[in-house]
Image (cartoon, grey):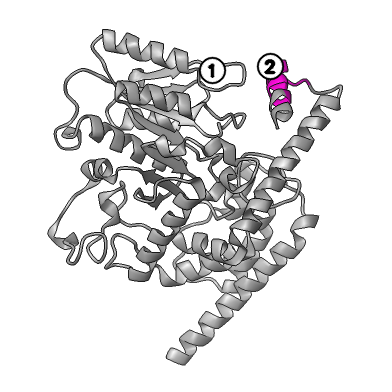
Amino acid sequence: MTAIFMHETQALIESAARLVVDYYKTLPQRPVLVPSTSESLREVLCEPLPVDGTGFETLLGTLRDVVFRFSRHNGHQRFFGYVASPGTPITTAGSMIEAALNANLTSWRSAPPAAELEHLVITWLKEMLGYPSSAEGLLVSGGSMANLAAMAAARSAIRPEAARNGLSGPPLTVYVSSESHFSLRKAAAILGIGEANVRIVSTDAQLRMDPAELERLIRVDLAAGRVPMCVSANLGTVGTGAVDPIDAIAKIAHRYGLWLHVDAAYGGFAALAPSGQPYFEAISEADSVTLDPHKWLYVPVGCGCVLYKNPSAAYSAFSHNAEYTRTIGLERNEAFAFWNYGPELSRPFRALNLWLLLKYAGTKRIGDAIESNIGCAKYFEKLVCASEDWVRDKNVAHHAADERSAQ
């Protein structure tokens, strides 16, 4: 029986590997997408609930002829939509290994090596950014979940009993720019702060948060008896990649006792590129940081990160105990539980692909790739400025020219 199982396992994996290798080989010749409709795909894919099994080669045929053919290939050299990393062979292999292990990172005892690797890659991420080594963090499903976790920690820092007793007293207020990701407003809604208590701070000509307007809104809320809780600065906005003046915002946050969050989901790994490093000079001022390795660190979708400078606020927001999850051992070692610092209990082995990529490629090679991406953007800027069919905002163009002159 074991021999039959191993033979079947080998055949399945080898057939799937051939399909993946063929995909990488043929990707440059494929169109970025083949037009389709929901109805046409349903006609091909929908069927009654299977009672009997189907041969794997038949299933691979469906994957090849339908799933692969009609997917939008974000690893294609002509894919310019969204912000999605291309797949890499090393993380393709890693995903297969992750699935084989099927580790569940609830805590150290449930997956000891996987837990240690997650602690390790968090340490590496902090080092990349220049974030305090004493900070803690964990990998989550993406930037939206990281923003939710950070805002929950901010809420507990201001109202320590909110997680247990609910919100009471004067309304809490949150400050984001008009360019910030909508997940921050969504997080406020989920956490009971209320989307109506999210203040939208205007931006300057370069689409960066205006610190003077931020301070004005804080003072208005204080005068009205509200409690300013958190300000979220952007390190790379969704629409334009704008970077807010984090140092100036940090001074205001400290002056009024606000939690400073930095949403670096889009731009965080520019820290590995020489031209991006100046944007991170004030990152250590942040109480929390959102990162998305599945964007500019080229790992598969499903890997975000939240960092906490003072993890006790996150512990206050998320810690729970039950007899079936009771931990035994030294705190931060064998007794460490990821669920005490984020919303998830069951968690996949997200660190594996991140560890594999960083070890396999090294930060020098990855930084060079990011610098190359930035170079492509600057080249595109020149094409836009030289084209009669495109118009660039004059204020942004002037700002870019000023930055080049300063360099």
For the magenta stretch, what is the residue range? 391-401
Left/right of residue 331 with respect to residue 209 in the rendered view: left
Q: Secondary structure at mark 2?
A: helix
Q: Residue at x 47, y 64 (%)?
A: 352
Q: Position of residue 229 (x, y in %)?
A: 30, 25
Does the magenta portion include 216?
no
Q: Nearer the viewer, residue 72 or 399?
A: 399
Task: Choose top left, top right, bottom left or bottom right for residue 168.
Answer: top left
Q: Nearer the viewer, residue 397 or 292?
A: 397
What residue does disc 2 label?
395
- On residue 203, which mark appears? 1
Q: Is residue 76 above or below residue 63?
A: above
Q: Secondary structure at mark 1?
A: loop
Q: Is most of the magenta stretch helix, strand or loop?
A: helix
Task: Choose top left, top right, bottom left or bottom right for residue 357.
Answer: bottom right
Query: How far separated are the C-alphas under marks 2 and 1?
Result: 12 Å
Left/right of residue 355 with respect to residue 256 in the rendered view: right
Quadrant where the N terminus sits is: bottom left
Q: Nearer the viewer, residue 3 or 59?
A: 3
Q: Position of residue 339 (x, y in %)?
A: 27, 52
Q: Callout 2: few (<14), some (14-19), or many (20+) C-alpha neighbours within 10 Å? A: few
Mark 2–mark 1 contact, CB under 8 Å?
no
Q: Residue at x 80, y 56 (%)?
A: 29
